[in-house]
Amino acid sequence: MTALMRDLLRMMTGNTLPVITGRTASVAVNYPIIGEMGLVHPVTGMKLAGSPLGTCGKNGSGGLFLYCSREVFKAGLTRDSNSIKFGLVGEGKSAEEKLEIIGDVERGLRTMVTDLKDEYSLLASKIPGARVLRMGDKSVSINALDNSIPRDMQLLMIEALVLSAMTGRKAKLSPTDKVALQRAHAAAHSGRSQALLVHLKEAMTNPTPEVICEIANLPLSEKDSQYAKRLYADLTRELTHALSLLTKGGSLSGNFDEPTTPGLLDPTPLLVLSLKDLPAEKWPSTLVVFNFFIGSKLQSGVKSSKMMPFHTIRHDEAWKLVGDPGFLASTIELYKIGNSLGVSNRITAHQPANLFAQADSEAIETLLGDATTRVLFKLGKKAAESSQALLGLTDHEVERVQQLEPLQSMFKVGDLTGITVNHRPALNHSKIRPIVETRNELRQS
């Protein structure tokens, strides 16, 4: 009997496989369920570089689990560098997220994370050079019409903002809505060195006679008629109301209707966008602007060969936001930009059903289709079985994901067999555990 066969038999009976012999390419490729050796380069047979997130394989037989979305993408194991994370409350999703951030920082990668519960501020305080932007603070603002944002991206942002302000009354804008916003957007910039959102609102409420007839679909001979004006007002009433909410004095205004604060995205190892002090109804519109602002900076950084502001963008607790069509549209756009530039995006939710229950199913499928890495913590039986096809799970993986313990996850990377990861060993360091494992129900001595 060869040494390899002895090791395989030991593994099958539950004994620990020696790490040296367990890292061969043949075990990882031919016995993926038994070996679970982690992420192996398909050409070299070596483990991919990445951050240590715990151990993998039965009884830790696969040794350290190393993960980096960029390395996985470069190795051709996925068609994008994006990911999505699901799992029940209290299973360790945020703890794993923080482990990844710490690993990224140590490897020189820059991260932005949206923080709805002020859960990442402590982590930021322990990382030299990290910054926390507290939205709701009047000193922080991004102008939605900032000249640094390309005009076509401004229009996409405005459409998403208006959808967000409509609070679900529309999942999509009509062609007439889009033309009206395009004309108001052009008028807002006309004759100004720097337009603001309030100028767009003014252009919407005081259009030229030509625009009135275009939107009302009337001949120019009607441009001065009261009928044309009333028809225009009826067709743009929802848009005007949405813009009123978003501009000064409106219930959603505050962080994107003033000139952009200088240096917001200056290089930093970790930028935490804290929304805790902001009313929940303002979260989606604020993140719409940030998503597009960051997207524009990513694109301009590539074009000008400047430093990329972020390598990874993480939306924690995203299940609370995806029901907003504006946030969802901006996130899909950011995922597309990430795909083209190699920037990793991740959103975290409890279970797929949460997303589909709150948002347009076609848009959710688009979002999931742009994220071919799924990080799964424990799911209930119904959630695991109903999302099997969506997540690309085998029958065996559906069973495994229901049996995961707290601080265990399954990394389903592309078409590879899911890898069970125990994150607890990565928390053993006395300086890491207090800032990562923040939920009392997960603390175990």
Image (cartoon, rainbow, N blue to C red):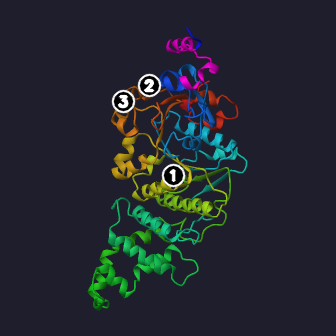
Disc 1 and disc 2: Cα gap in Å? 33 Å
- Mark 1 vs 2, N-terminal side: 1
Q: Residue furthest right?
A: 128
Q: Give yes or no for contact between labels 2 and 3 (Cβ–Cβ under 8 Å).
A: no
Quadrant that contains the N terminus: top right
What stretch of residues is rendered in magenta? 4-26
Task: Say which label, 1 or 3, has the lower sequence index.
Answer: 1
The local crowd at label 1, few if under 14, some if 14 to 19, many if 20 or more residues have their Cα within 10 Å, is: some
Query: Which amino acid does the dot numbered 3 rest on?
Result: Lys
Side of 113 relative to 336 (left or right): right
Give how far apart the Cα atoms at labels 2 and 3 are. 10 Å
The residue wearing badge 1 is 339
Secondary structure mainly formed by the magenta segment: helix
Residue 427: x and y, percent?
A: 63, 31
Q: Which mark is residue 403?
A: 2
| Residue 327 in the image, given as x and y percentages of width and height | 45, 57
The answer to whether residue 251 is seen in the rendering is no
Magenta span contains residue 17 = yes
The structure residue drawn at horizontal position 51% and vertical position 79%, both measured from the top left corner, is 189
Would you name the residue on which mark 3 appears?
Answer: 381
Looking at the picture, which amino acid does disc 2 mark?
Gln
Q: In front of the other: label 1 or label 3?
A: 1
